[in-house]
Amino acid sequence: MTVDAAVAEFRDRLDLEQRLRPFESLRYRASDAGTTAVHLDDFAAIPFLDGVSGVEHYQHRARLRARSGDVYVASTSAPTGYERYCREVLGLGAVGLLAVDPGGDRLAIASACLANRALLDRLGALARRGGLVVEPFLGTEAIWDLATAVAAGAGARVGVLAPPPPVTWIANDKANFEDLVNAVLGPGFLPESRRSASAEALARALLELSETGPSVALKRLRCASAMGNEVFESEALRRHGFPGVLDIVRGFLERTGWEGDEDVLAVCWERATSSPSTQWWLPPPGGGAPILSGVYEQILAGEEGVFVGSRPSGLAAEVEERIVFQSGQLAAALQRLGYVGRCSFDHLVLPDGRVVFTECNGRWGGTSTPMNLVDRLYPAARPPYQAQAVVHPRLVGLTFQQLLARFGDAVHERGSGAGRFLLYNVGPLKQFGKFDVVALGSSRSHVDELMTVELPRLLGVS
């Protein structure tokens, strides 16, 4: 099926023309470029993120996207010295932080904004000065409700730099994404899978799939960073038989808070030689074709493949070309369905040379955030680099200013170009000994040395 035919089929099946109509006046336009923006990373719609240590501090990753005159929203304060670091050391411009009380849900900051009259008035005042763009982590219903309220209150232009919710959930729901891949590219571009909202059917599916490979898995549809996945050895499953596998499935559903009305995927868990991602920017209508921002190697941890970092890919050119072509077809389809903004695709390179998709990330994430930061600092050409999460018990209790002191002149300074490390996502540092770092090198091997030798030495944890 061609991209055009796949798009037409999706539009008809999901009744997109009717469902997108309420969002039309707020959709981002090419003419909105350069407009003052409010950035907010509301994670409330992604299951299980509330179990990530210090995740409410991840809201400050939005600061890295903001430019002079913009504002961003967070429910926590930035660590002492962090705003000065962003402005004066990284040269990211003067940006305002709007504090909001999220009440009972520390991640639901869009809803908290809606309940905060003073904050709505502040955003309305920005909109009346020349329009306002709402640039979120993810284009959820709450984000669009916030934009609607600001536009109505201000009587001014407000645009949302994200897809409307019906399109957001084509990209971010694993079942919908599977359907899109099959419609655009045909069979053979996904691991073998089954889906059901029945525990019994899922148990049977796992046993069937266990005959095709050494491992199988269950996947919840709207989770991030593999946190809704559980992997099982095929041989061990077969020894349990159907009653035992049914108990395993029921345990998974209970642990993941399944409410009985959502399909779950049973998949063949492929062994891969590489787990690359392709990063795309999808312009609005009239803004041109999808733009490839890069191909990245993902650094994954554990059997479930939890994301912990990334670096530009070192794959063979022929493999990269296939990945880019395949993902470009899907990016074009999403754009024609109404998607705008940041989007990425996760792939597996299999031992037999085939490349398959695992999911789409229709949002800002752990690869695109540092990529965007590096691009802001190096607009002419991106240097070799690696971004990675750092967690160490000996860092618990350390303040951001003490962390800066440990790095000393190894911290990159935009003005001079000196220093090899960028620090961000530092909110969880003091309580959890956790932050994110980018190592900037002259070559891939130099970056490896910075991460494996120099970084532990500077931190005092080698």
Image (cartoon, rainbow, N blue to C red):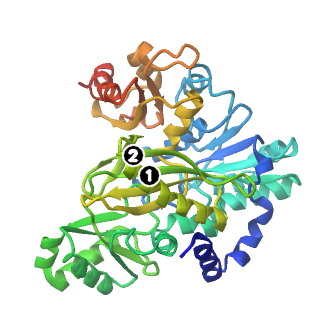
Decide if residue 222 is in sight here: yes
- Residue 323 coordinates in the image, percent (x, y): 43, 55
* Badge 1 element: helix
Q: Identify the residue shown where x is 47% and y is 27%.
A: 422
Q: Identify the residue shown where x is 58% and y is 28%.
A: 380
* Badge 2 element: helix
In the foreground, 420 or 138:
420
- Left or right of 175: which side holds 75? right
Q: Identify the residue shown where x is 53% and y is 18%.
A: 413
- Left or right of 184: which side holds 88? right
Q: Identify the residue shown where x is 51% and y is 38%.
A: 371
Q: Residue furthest front?
A: 318
Q: Which amino acid does label 1 sit on?
A: Glu
- Left or right of 295: which side holds 78? right
Establish if 413 lies above or below 220. above
| Mark 2 surroundings: few (<14), some (14-19) or many (≥20) residues within 10 A | few
Please give the label number shown on residue 321: 1
In the foreground, 328 or 416:
328
| Mark 1 surroundings: few (<14), some (14-19) or many (≥20) residues within 10 A | few
Decide if residue 118 is in sight here: no
- Residue 285 coordinates in the image, percent (x, y): 73, 58
> Looking at the rendering, which quadrant does residue 444 occupy?
top left
Establish if 272 lies above or below 10. above
In the foreground, 372 or 130:
372
Q: What residue type is labelled 2?
A: Ala
- Residue 203 coordinates in the image, percent (x, y): 26, 81
> Looking at the rendering, which quadrant does residue 200 occupy?
bottom left
CB within 8 Å, label 1 to label 2: yes
In the foreground, 251 or 19:
19
Disc 2 marks which residue? 317
